[in-house]
Image (spheres, rainbow, N blue to C red):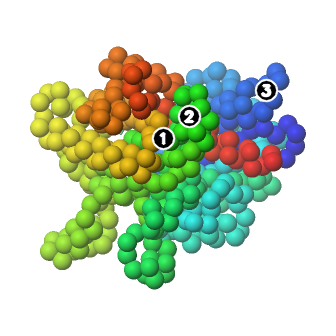
Amino acid sequence: MTATATRVLVLNSGSSSVKYQLLDMNPDSGGGPAAGTRLAVGLVERIGEETSRLAHTPLATGGDKRETEGPIADHGAALKAVAAELSADGLGLDSPQLAAIGHRVVHGGLKFTAPTVIDDAVLAEIERLVPVAPLHNPANITGIRTAQALRPDLPQVAVFDTAFHTTMPEYAARYAIDVATADAHRIRRYGFHGTSHAYVSRKTAELLGKDPSEVNVIVLHLGNGASASAVAGGRCVDTSMGLTPLEGLVMGTRSGDIDPAVTFHLKRVAGMSEDDVDVLLNKKSGLVGLCGDNDMREIRRRIDEGDERAELAFDIYIHRLKKYIGAYTAVLGRVDAVAFTAGVGENAAPVRAAALAGLEEMGLAVDADLNAVRSGEPRLISPECARVAAAVVPTDEELEIAQQTYALVSA
Ligand code: AMP
């Protein structure tokens, strides 16, 4: 890496999409962009279809968003198209200013507790974890291989969704099942959304004017996928997702917690296959299963029109959230803040108000005026007298991945 190499390309590769951001991590910003400045952001969708779409915004030049539609056959073609867009703005991937490519990798098992420079052995381990992350790790691997082919000389860094949760004590991470079976198949709670939980818990401490080591935070990452975590002094001590991202809160399309016997029952009584049950619980459950919509805006709109199904779905979603807030209050003993983040957490004031309603005995309260404020900044929504702070803290997984990647390659 040269002294001027301060840029990091962050890639988040899904099965048919690639999200990307090019950031400048310029550490001493003397005259240059401030650390974490976004130079370009974009998204390639529907890879492998006739109607693939690339949307690219060149923030560095202040240019408008450019959108192109047309077939993009695979991830290799997608990344080449992204590289061409970046080149057009003088931000090409061949630039000596590019320090590294940071990849979001969903499952890092127990082995990866920190961001890791990817070599053949690391890639083989990520591949070994495919059975526990069949929806995510294969796409992440494709993204890594594609980027390696494009810039074989450049450090490629994996930042794992699971890493932040590897500090969970054994009693929180283990399921109460036969130990030999669990160990043979690496069955335990890993947790996900770790980069978000790490970023948001740190930012919440900052909002309170404290060092992360001094505060206990419950982070509620409420997006289409949703998870809660209990963070004590900057370390995760419990989280709601488990072996896979299916466990825990009610999500957009996933059931979250469910009696595992439901799965045998569906197989024995309803004649469903393993794959049918997998699709049911991951894609056709949660809010969409309960009321046909997974977008909280639409659900709120329907409730305002008196739709009872939407209202029940909302109530089930909130009830589960409350149970986790209660459980993590008990796990932490002392809670300094509850932080809401991600699409629903950052934008849906009624969700925040309902999740904390009636929890005054636990020191939690919401100030209606503060809760109604719309802003992209971290902010408090609790009244000053509340014993526990309630906050909205926008997440920034890409910045966190870029920071972790740059810290590793510039060390
Ligand atoms: P994410 O996965 O973090 O991108 O969050 C996506 C979800 O955020 C969507 O499914 C919506 O339900 C929710 N969302 C986004 N904007 C709003 C809003 N203004 N009000 C309520 N929910 C929102």
N-term-proximal mark, 3 vs 2: 3
User: Dot 1, how many residues are within 10 Å of its Cα: few (below 14), some (14-19), or many (20+)?
Assistant: many
Whether residue 48 can be seen here: no
**Foreground: 234 or 23?**
234
Residue located farthest toward the top when viewing the structure as drawn: 369
In the rendered image, which residue does mark 1 sit on?
A: 217
Q: Element under label 1?
A: strand
Where's residue 122, x and y in %? 67, 66
Residue type at tag 2: Ala
Q: CA distance from mark 3 to mark 2?
A: 25 Å
Q: CA distance from mark 3 to mark 1?
A: 32 Å
| Amino acid of disc 1 | Val
Q: Nearer the viewer, residue 144 or 242?
A: 242
* Residue at figure coordinates x 44%, y 40% from the top left: 335
Check disc 3 and give the amino acid type: Ser
Mark 2 and mark 1: Cα distance apart in space? 8 Å
Mark closer to the observer (3, 2): 2
Quarter of the view holding residue 110: bottom right
| Residue neighbourhood size for the residue with mark 3, other residues' Cα within 10 Å, grouped as few (<14), some (14–19), many (≥20) | few
Q: Is residue 325 left or right of residue 1?
A: left
Q: Which residue is mark 2?
A: 205
| Residue 355 location, quadrant | top left
Q: Is residue 214 left or right of residue 117?
A: left
Q: Position of residue 120 (x, y in %)?
A: 71, 68
- Assign ligand 1 to one image quadrant: top left
> How many numbered discs, if any?
3
Q: Earlier in the sequence, mark 3 or mark 1?
A: 3
- Mark number displayed over residue 29: 3
Residue 189 rendering spot, x and y as whole percentages: 45, 63
Label 2: which secondary element: helix
Asked if the residue under mark 1 is in contact with the one under mark 3, i.e. CB atoms within 8 Å, the reply is: no
